[in-house]
Structures are given as C-alpha cells and as structure tokens.
Image (tube, coloured by chain):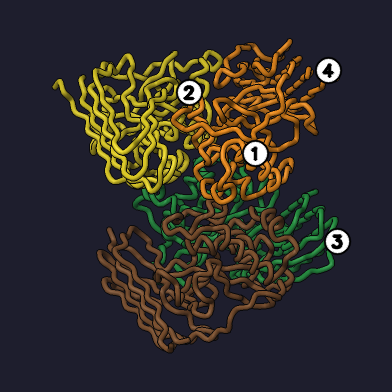
Chain colours: A orange, B brown, C green, D yellow
Amino acid sequence: MRLSIEAQLDYTLSAPADLLFALEVAQMPDQILVTDRFTVSGVDVLRPVLGEESVGRRTWAAGADRISAHYSATVDVDRGPVVLAGLAADRLHDLPPEAVRYLFPSRYCEADRFETAVCREFGGLNGGDLVRAMADWIREHVDYVPGSSDANTTAADTYVSHRGVCRDFAHLLIAMARASSIPARMVGAYAWGLEPQDFHAVVEVWLEGGWHLVDATGLAPTDGIVRVGVGRDATDISFLTVFGQAQLNSQQVRVERMDA
Amino acid sequence: MRLSIEAQLDYTLSAPADLLFALEVAQMPDQILVTDRFTVSGVDVLRPVLGEESVGRRTWAAGADRISAHYSATVDVDRGPVVLAGLAADRLHDLPPEAVRYLFPSRYCEADRFETAVCREFGGLNGGDLVRAMADWIREHVDYVPGSSDANTTAADTYVSHRGVCRDFAHLLIAMARASSIPARMVGAYAWGLEPQDFHAVVEVWLEGGWHLVDATGLAPTDGIVRVGVGRDATDISFLTVFGQAQLNSQQVRVERMDA
Amino acid sequence: MRLSIEAQLDYTLSAPADLLFALEVAQMPDQILVTDRFTVSGVDVLRPVLGEESVGRRTWAAGADRISAHYSATVDVDRGPVVLAGLAADRLHDLPPEAVRYLFPSRYCEADRFETAVCREFGGLNGGDLVRAMADWIREHVDYVPGSSDANTTAADTYVSHRGVCRDFAHLLIAMARASSIPARMVGAYAWGLEPQDFHAVVEVWLEGGWHLVDATGLAPTDGIVRVGVGRDATDISFLTVFGQAQLNSQQVRVERMDA
Amino acid sequence: MRLSIEAQLDYTLSAPADLLFALEVAQMPDQILVTDRFTVSGVDVLRPVLGEESVGRRTWAAGADRISAHYSATVDVDRGPVVLAGLAADRLHDLPPEAVRYLFPSRYCEADRFETAVCREFGGLNGGDLVRAMADWIREHVDYVPGSSDANTTAADTYVSHRGVCRDFAHLLIAMARASSIPARMVGAYAWGLEPQDFHAVVEVWLEGGWHLVDATGLAPTDGIVRVGVGRDATDISFLTVFGQAQLNSQQVRVERMDA
C-alpha cells in the first residue's frame, strides 16, 4: 500500500542543546521510500548519521530557543502478512554477529529475569509458534493504558503492573523472546491504522535467518508498519533525543493511505 | 500439640558490634510458652526489648569476635485449623490503628504495583476466599528454590522470577493482600514439619476483626507454627540483625513434637 | 508563636473509594492545638483513627465523585531552637521499642546501602554533631527542584540525582542517620515561613532519650514547624491516601503567624 | 612489551547448553597477536563469531556435563602511555555512527541519572581533562572490595555504596562520561601487573576522533592492557555467557611479561 506520512514536533529549549532526530523512514526492500522531506527551523546545524544496524538514518541538530521539525514522506509498503507460525529458531551458533547482540538483556528488557516465567507459561513451544504465543499472552494480560508508564518503566515493571503503552508491550515481548534465546530487537515505526495516531513501537524477532515483524499490541496491521530505526530497546529508537533540557509544545503524527 | 524447639547460631564478628536477636517464642493465647532458655556466649551485654506490636521480645547483645547463641523452648500450640473461607474483610474505616499500617506498601512488598494484577486474577473474590485464592495461586506459580533470592529480593521480583524461598512467598502474599486493601503482616516463626528444618516466614491477614495465619508456601501445617515476632516485612522479623559485619559459621533449627 | 493554619484539598474520584486524610495537627507538648475544624463534603463516612506512634490522628472518609476537604487550626508552638550539637547517641541496647523500628531500612530509605558513604564522609562524628553535618551536607549537595522526583524516588535515587523536594531531603537524611545506627523517622508537617506554602516533610532523630526535629531542607525555621504525623517514611505520612483512583483538582496550604 | 597470556575455565553444566566464550585476544594495531590457541574439551560444536564493533572474536560452544576451556596467547603490546589531558571532545554532530550508540544509557550505566552529579562535581572541565578527573574521583571515592557487588549492580548502585570491583569502576566511569556527552564503552581485557591476576574490565572514551583507554581502577598500567572485546557494558563483554545453568569449578588467568 502507498502511505503518506507526516510528523511534526515543536519544542522549546531552555539552553542551547544538541538534538538527535529519528523521524526518517528507512529505505528497505519491503518499504520503498518514494519521496521525503525533513525540515527543522530554529537550528544552525543539520547533519545526518546512519541508524543502528545501518537501518535508516537519524539527523543531528543544534539549536537554542524554539525548535520546529517537520517530516513528510510517501512510502510504498509491500509486505505480505507476517506468518510466524512454523518458523524455526536458528541454533545459537549459527547466528550472525548482528543477531547475537539481541540475545542479551538490555536496559529496558531484563531477559535474564524471565527464564522461569517463559518456561512455565510457554514450555513445549518453539520458534515462531512460541513468539506468536508470547505476543498473544501479552495482549491478553497487559492493558493498554495511556500514561501508565514512563521513561523508567522496564519489561519487568510491565509484567507486574499489567499496564503499559506500545513501548512497554514491545519491551516485554523482547524480554520474553530473548529469555528463550530468540534474538529480538525494537523497531521505531509509523503505523497505518493506529488509533489515536502516534509514533509506534514494535518488535523484530530473528527466525530462520532473518528478522520478522511482530506488533505485541496488535493495534495496527503489520502490513501498514513503516520502520524508522531499530535497536536494543527504547533507548536506541527514540524519535528525539535531547542532549540538554527541552519542553514539548506539540507533537503530531499522521499516516494516511493514498491508494485506497 | 507440645513442641520442643532448639535454635543455635554461631557467628564471627570482624569488629565489635551490636546484635539484635529475634529467636524467642512469643507468649500468645494460641501458643503457650511452657519454658524457655536463651544463652549467648561471647557477649558482654544482654538486654531484652519488646517486639513489634508488643508481640514477643527480642534481645540486644554486644560483642566482639565469636558469638554463639542457643535458644531452647517448650511450647504448647493450641490452634484449630485456620479456616479463611467465608471470613469477611473489614471495612477500612473500621480498622484499628494497629491494622492500618499493614495496608501500606513496604520495603519488600510493593502493594501499589499489584493492583491491576490482583484485580485481573482474583476479581470477584473477597475477604478470606480472596486470601485463600492468592495463597493457592502463589503456591502454583512460584517454585520453591533454595538460594534463588537474596536480601534485596522484593515481591515484584518474585512475581517476575517465579522462584523464591519462604520469605519471598510471604512477601508476595502480603503485597497482594494489601493491594486488595486487606491488612497483612509478616510473621517470623518456628514450624513443625518443615523440611529441611529452618526458620520459617508466614503471613497474618486481618479479617473480621483479627489476625489469621496463612503459610503461602504450604510447607508446614498451620497448627504447628510458633510465632517469634511480627512486622511489615522481612526487615522487622530477621532472627538476627547485626549492626556491623558478621560471618555466619553455622545455624541450626530443630522443632520436634513431644506429645505424639 | 501562634499560627493559623488552613489546608484545602479538592479531588474527583472516578469510582467510590476510601480515603485516609492526615491533615490534623497533633496535640503535643511543644505544639498546643488551641482550636481546629475539619470538614469534608461529598463523603458519607468520617471516622478518626490514631496516627502512627499515637502521634496525631487521621480521618477515614468514604465517598464518590467530588471530595472537598477543608482543615483550619490555631496552634501555639512553643519550642526553643533545636540544638543538635553535642547531643549523644544512645547505645543501641538502651533504645526503647518505639525507637528500635526506626533503625531499619524502609521503602524509601535504604539505610543499608549508605554505610560506607556515611563512614567515608562523616567518619569521626557522632550523635547530634553527626546529624547536623549530614543535614548540612544534604543541603549543600542536593538541589531543591520542584517536580524532580516522584512517588517512586528513594533516598539512593536522590543521592545519585542530587535533586529533590522536601520529602527527598528527608528520606536521604533518614537513610544516612539510620546507616549510622541513629533512629530517624519522618514527620509530616505544616511549616511557617515555607515558600511557596505547601505541606512539608521533616525528620526526627532519636538522641539522648528523645526525638529531635531536623529540617534537611533548611527552608523553614524549626520553631515554626507543626507536626501532623510521624512514620517510617513518606508511606506513613501522606496527607491523603486514596484506596482507589482520584484526580487532584486543587490543593492549598496557608500558614500565618497571628501574634507578630 | 611481549606478553604471555593463559586463561583456564572449568565448568559443570546441569543440562546441555550453549556457551559463548569471549577469551580471545583481539588483533588490533596497538596489540599484535603473535600466536594463540583456544581449545575446549567436552563440547561438540566450536564456532567463531565476530565481536561487537568487529573488535576481536568470540566462540560458540555447545556441550553437556563438564566443560574445560584453555586459551593461550603471545601478544606484542605497543602502546605509548595514554595521555587524556588536553584531548578535546568531538562535537556531537561530528560523531560517527559507531560512537553515537555509546552516548546512551545502558543496562548497567544509567547515564541519564548522573547529569547533575557530573555538572556539580566537574563543572568547567571538558574532554580528556574531564575524563581524567572522573577517573581520579572514582578511584578516590570508591573502595575496591572483592565480593561487594554482583551481576545486578549498576553504576548508580556503586555511586551510592562506594564499593565495587573493576566492572563497577568501569560502569561508573562510563555512566559519568556519557552523562557529559562523551561516548564511552566497556572493554574486556587481560592486564599485565594486575594483582591478583584475573580478567579485567576497563573503559574506552571517544575523544578527538578515536577511542582512548582508561582504567578507572588504576590497578594496572595501560600499556599492559590487552583487549578481548568491547561493548556497551558488562552485558557485552562477559568472558563466558551460558545459555542455561552452569556451575563454576575453577577459573584462572595468568599474564606474564616475556621480554623483561
């Protein structure tokens, strides 16, 4: 499907600061970027830098006072439905280096603490069937509650509180997958059909030699997801990282289908 | 039943230190202390102090080098089986002050984080039926694994790891009960029938105007439990608190039935 | 000095809930309550319950929808300046039971983690001189920043972040005092001279057989502090504990001197 | 200098498990690997995989029962003394992608919590002078105490406890450097002159376009450090990661100078 994407961020800085934006759609085989345009007012530097795993790119800016960023893109997403069922997990010693690092616990995904939980709940399942069951379990056991978590909330916190937003759903799925020795990484994304419209966070798991998208929230169809960047967890995919103090004034995301 | 209790602790201090022992059986209507004797070698002070809620007593000691404590008691436990089923929860505004403080989160029992979990899992249950269901749930979902927790492990940690020892089972039950507005406190105890023999930790919940014993581990029959002290959580019922550095050499507990 | 105190709380409940107010001035030798009046609209129960350590009293309420509480009091504070310098610490085995519990770590005051910090920073000091030095250190090393902490912030968090509000200052002082085996408890209070006017949190340490007030923030003179309640940490002294969900609409505190 | 390195690990697995060894010396311009040999008995798979940032390599093994690994190497270290003083910090927007990821908080290095601490303690310093001052501060304020930390200990924990081992010193320096927007990563290493001999953990900071070694413990001379691998923190540089349960039987490291 062809999607039109718009994102707008408006911030006020209390002092001159560097900012790292991750708003730009990644050029990838299953999501072809037709055209895009990124403008930021109120800054005197604008410098691109590759994303993690060379997926997508980010943009450095340096400014003071008021910063306004506007991103618009047209992208063709051509991705069949993601079918996890039946996909086998790779043997650990066959994993390439770029998957190995996604086996380990990270700041928001304490995989090492979920080993017994995963074993008790999903014993007997493997590979794609296991990941599918985990995502279903999370959707069933965690309530989607805007405002219920913050920048310190981890997968273990979410497992206890049974509440969270998309990043928490993603962190919990990642922690569970890694606890079962399945590499899992976080994906910052735009998503068609998400209500209310906002930035989205989903997951990729490594099965049968490649990465496969999973949305633990089930709030948006996988074939309307557009990746911005990937990383170990929310730390790596923040759409804006401020090296200093900033005040959010407004933020808007709009994803629309152009061909239907 | 009449029980004979023996506890022996042997420690080495690296420097002069104060110690607070909580080893002595509490004199209470359902556990009559017939006789006991507490001796500590290697100390130059030995001073009793009342326990929390005036339940039982503790003993201060001050020593250096090697400390050996020996406690022996004969106690008659006369307590019918504790039947929680059907007991009603008191309305909050009818609670006496000594129950109110056991409604709140404490160091090891983050009751405030369990509200949704408790609501989802036990919705519709109340009072004694609810506590019974919580204890059953814990026994079913947490593995008793010696060495799986340490002095930092909280109820939330146990809920995630699904592993723990008696203090962890108790903390989790306390956190869940408080999350449902049922006052719950921790009880340090000796227990007949516990295998292997050791100090034990159980729970008391406030229902229908009084405290009721529950052993979340189910490892020992309630009618063979002998209270030493009570408190908010493990912080308050440690059988030995050292104000300094100590090295455990050995520790032994023996509880035997004398009348059967 | 004679003080006039007014506190006003306005909340909206999303469902019927119990509330525990701790707003009433405690009657104590150094703060004589001349007259007070506590009214709550929108509730159908109003029941008093003693405070922790029998200091002051709290009030249970049960309501739905909108709750408005208004408290006004006239109180004579007659307390000389608190001089900590020179006060000796009691030997541990001389402490009464009501001081012993304030030696231990609690939810927000991880005393056990501060032992080396305290030893390195304040080695050689004891008793009141030590507490004085701790309060000075905190005032010098922690910035008072409204909004910099939340309901999960502990003393250790504040030690790392170097930022906090009055409850964080109090928690840190309590943790440090207990780490030095000096009993310390938290005091919820009104304070004359505090800018901006708000509820206040200060500390009491046990020295030479009694409790002594310390304000780690130094923002209000000790002789204008009026205790509401005491406890292990913020858990016990919250001016309003809601057993359910509530939305704050407004909250106001006013303390004025009547005799000057 | 020419060094001879030997490492020996002996483990017992309770069930068949995969293992990832990171023992092999990285081939790098300032540490030329002359010869090495890695053998593992008790395994049926042995497969190399590149290290993080393509620094060094790790080895997968899969086995059951008893695992014995032996690594020996001869390496020429030719590295002048590392002089941080005077080195400038790069502007953020000039950082290459492989440095950007080392600006962010990670599991053990909560950089975001140290901003005020760093600003208060080291205000006015920049670049290499700042890092030098941080390392000195850590050495002065943290006691090296074997056994004082565990696999959960973070930089913030170490800042509070003032105690740790080499990994804790490294984590704290990394957290502080990142809090000042200086990229910092962890280095797993062998170290000549370390007493007692063991695996070592040090830090690399990015200044003036390249990585520079710093040993926050000061326990071993920088010119005798031999890198094995790098990563965000201890998660990435563990010399052995077991995907299952293992019991350590023995572990030995020996680093000797061959040319002096």
Q: Secondary structure at mark 1?
A: helix
Q: Above or below — where is D196 with respect to D5?
A: below
Q: Secondary structure at mark 4?
A: loop
Residue A260, x across and y down, in percent: 86, 20
Residue B204, x across and y down, in percent: 58, 72
**Which one is in front in this view, the residue at disc 2 or the one at disc 1?**
1
- Judging from the image, mark 1 belongs to the subunit labelled A
Circle 4 Cα neighbour tier, 10 Å, few/some/many (<14 / 14–19 / ≥20): few
The answer to the question of whether label 4 and label 1 lie on touching residues, with beta carbons closer than 8 A, is: no
**Which one is in front in this view, the residue at disc 3 or the one at disc 1?**
1
**Which one is in front in this view, the residue at disc 3 or the one at disc 4?**
4
> Mark 2: which amino acid?
Ile
Q: Circle 3 is placed at which residue position?
A: C42
Which of D136 and A59 lies nearest the eye of the viewer? A59
The answer to the question of whether label 4 and label 2 lie on touching residues, with beta carbons closer than 8 A, is: no
Q: Circle 1 is placed at which residue position?
A: A132
The residue drawn where x is 61% and y is 65% is B136
Res. C98 in view: no
Question: Where, by quadrant of the figure, is residue D190 drawn?
Answer: top left
Side (left or right) of C104 relative to C165: left
Q: Circle 4 is placed at which residue position?
A: A258
- Judging from the image, mark 3 belongs to the subunit labelled C
